[in-house]
Image: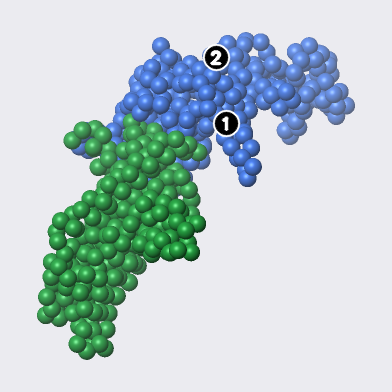
Amino acid sequence: MTAGANRIFVIAQNTYREAVREKLLYNLFAFSTLMILSSIVLAKMHLGYDERIYYDVGLAAIAFFGVLIAIFVGINLVYRELAQKTVYTMLAKPVHRWEFVVGKYAGLVSLLALEIGMMAALFMLVVWYKDTQFPIQLLYAIGLIFMELVLITAVALFFSSFTTPYLAAMFTVGLWIIGHLLADIRDFGNLPDAAGIRPITQALYWGLPNLDRLDLKGPAAAGQVIELGTVLSRALYALLYSAMLLIGAVALFQRRDFR
Amino acid sequence: MSLIQARGLRKSFRTGFLGRRVEAVRGVDLDVREGEIFGFIGPNGAGKTTTIKLLTGLILPTAGEAWIQGVPVSDPRSRQHLGFLPEGTFFHEYLTGAEFLDFHARLLGIPRDVRRQRIPELLQRVGIPHAADMRLRSYSKGMRQRAGLAQALIGDPDVLILDEPMSGLDPLGRKDVRDLILSLRDEGKTIFFSSHILADAEVICDQVAIIVRGRVVHQGYLDALLGQELSGVELVVEGIDENLFEQVQALAQRALVQGSRFQFEFDDEAEAEKALDWIRSEGGRIRSLVPRRRSLEDLFVEEAKKETHA
């Protein structure tokens, strides 16, 4: 391992170590577990739609709580490093600032991988416990939920690099909501009465991350066929967008004064 | 050879709602030679910590340049052989003392077998061998300061930059840190430390720089800075009556009654001589007569006053 890769690994490992001590993480994980388990009760109340309920509730729980963990735990961990000034002793070593950003990001993504893996395992257990099939499409959908979290974490890290944690959380939640509404925003701009704002809606559509592209929960739960190529191309989209945001975060960190 | 150098270092910040520009460091030049203890002293808000952050690459200069071992501080390689203790001991609280040192050692790429040997040695050296497995959040302020010093030493650095290393320590702790700094100098390390505790700086420093309002107003070796001339005389006497005490008090800068003893401080040697004559002629007993050299504190106060009135 090169010296730079070693430093990134050490920072990522420490970020992960700090994250697994976060109480918020366990609270959110407990709620997601409750929500996944609640699908068993909900299914009993909707006779005839058992499978669909397990799938919908399970995927929704993984996506919703995954996003909350990515935004709030992620922002908190970066903010704490800056606010509590623990970054001082790290950056006063031969650590490049980009290594710090990439290390933090890698630590957060590994935390999300663990969290998604655990929630997915619980989801599978519930499905198998109820003697229901677990089609491969569900795994594709979970894979893209993970890629959405990878992207959202990059967004959170980007905002954390230049603003306060509260604003960073607000901006990230805002972007997450808008990211799921981009098709509607574009369609709104295409209405005959909205010609004046069309450049803005077009700019938003093409400039912001289109998170709907990473949302295959509906088709997967409905049992529609999903091509692996589609999943991979969308995952690549999320990766490229995340890389762009990381480059932006690094550029902002390079110029930042740690006062 | 200068291991730490700065030329025309400046830093200004924008503060407040209107973004008013405040100049925290105004053209600082520094030369810290190999193997010396360099004290960077100044009142609170003088620019000590800002200068140190500029030297360690934590903030970027508005103008000027600085080098550590000849490498510009903008290059992280300048910190390859640097140990740094920040003011305020901000550490990862969830780590134990040993984990904390291990984390910093791994950032420096120190191999596992060296880490295993060095970590207990360093905890012993800074006086907290019992705290290796305690979480940092349960450390007292003094223990955290010691853990921070161990962290600064983990890479066996050639150059140490310590921001207020004695702050928060009790008298015993301050003595331990002074002894540690002196022993590090004996090992050939170069130590640059900031302090507002002048007595500590005067005891251990080879060279000092006094910074006031962002500007270095004095830099040099202590003997050269303080000179050999007397700054006053301290006289302790016994067996004088109230009238004589009042007469001498009028000549002295300061007078103290300590039971049957009277202590006087004179800025002017001639006035002390005059007081001595009076005391002898009245049958008073001289218990001590100590000439006072100009101290770092005297110099510091003079410079701080000059700068404030400027």
* Horizontal arrangement in the rendering, residue B226 relative to residue A144 (left or right): right
- Taking depth in this image into account, of A107 and B140 the one nearest to the observer is A107
Q: Position of residue A214 (x, y in %)?
A: 27, 60
Is residue B121 visible in the rendered image? The answer is no
Q: Quadrant of the N terminus of chain A?
A: top left
Image chain in blue: B
Image chain in green: A
Residue type at mark 2 is Gly
Residue type at mark 1 is Ser
Q: Position of residue B111 (x, y in %)?
A: 20, 34
| Residue at mark 1 | B12
Q: Position of residue B200 (x, y in %)?
A: 53, 28
Q: Identify the disc placed on residue B220.
A: 2
The mark nearer the N terminus, 2 or 1, is 1
* Horizontal arrangement in the rendering, residue B151 relative to residue B305 (left or right): left
Q: Quadrant of residue A134?
A: bottom left
The Cα atoms of the two marked residues, 2 and 1, are separated by 26 Å
The residue drawn where x is 40% and y is 54% is: A202
